[in-house]
Amino acid sequence: MLTVTFSARVAVHPDAAGRGVGRCLWAKLTEWILPQHPRQILSWADKSDCHSLAVADHWGFTRRPGTIEATEDLQNAEPWPWRYELRLDSLHLDSVLDHAVLPADVECHTLAEVVDDADLVASLHEAHEECRTDVPSWEPYQTMTKQDFEKSQRQRLVDGGFGLVAHRRRQVLAATFAEGMAFVPDLHNDFTMVHRSVRGQHLAVTLKARLITSALTLGFERITTEVRSDNAPMLAVNETLGFRRIAMRHLVSPPSAGMH
């Protein structure tokens, strides 16, 4: 019989914390997972988030063997996903605005504007597919049709996310995408891309700087992102913009642990 690994997290609004809502959600979730014969359930939390780690411990999670929390844990240059955050409440905005200026011949539009422009969304899809194959990843990238790509980006907007797209004469050069997080004023920057023909021209820094200023305007308090340890260009972008690496604790639970 095929066994699978599930990845799961539970989010509870702060106003409902301590009322057993999370426990009920977790019980229902594992009730759904168990009939599918899982091998294990994976999750993760900020190593400094004592409350979440205590809840995970109560639900039977333990630290995943072989996982990495600090740079000194890396061995043999093994790639590893580093999690980063930028807290907007303590941000020095001037330092970000210095990086937010695009070349005079490059325009920037929101993802909401682009998905309603047939030519721009076609150019964005083409550039996205090229860039996805260049970014270090754990599995070979599965290409998306233009229709599926456009559908996924419209769904991103419905779910509270947004994006910024830079283009020159309607040819997309770069873009950055972000997702809204449940119940918390956080934004997760899940992908930033730059067309091969214009790499090295600081467009990634510029678009991420504009993403930060947009997030501030929209009332977000924190931006998170994840970058592999072997993706040197994006690690440098994060450092330039003041992102701080979070020590994440990767957790594992046997499938029966969440049922009590």
Image (spheres, rainbow, N blue to C red):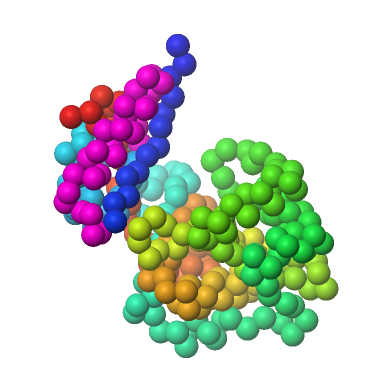
Residue occupying image coordinates x 32% and y 45% = 10
Q: Which residue lies furthest to the top in this view?
A: 1
Is residue 228 depicted above or below 141 in this figure?
below
Location of residue 79 in the rendering, given as x and y in whole percent from the top left corner: 48, 46
Q: Is residue 96 above or below residue 235?
A: below
Stretch in magenta: 14-42
- Residue 97 image position (x, y, % from top left): 53, 85
Residue sitting at x 56%, y 76%: 210
Q: Is residue 177 left or right of residue 195?
A: left
Quarter holding residue 83: bottom left
Judged by its main secondary structure, the magenta piece is: helix
Which image quarter is the N terminus in? top left
Query: In the image, residue 202 lies at what x, y percent?
Result: 63, 74
Q: In this view, does 77 lie to the left or right of 184?
A: right
In the image, residue 170 lies in the stretch drawn in magenta: no
Placement of 86 over or under 142, stated as above or below:
below
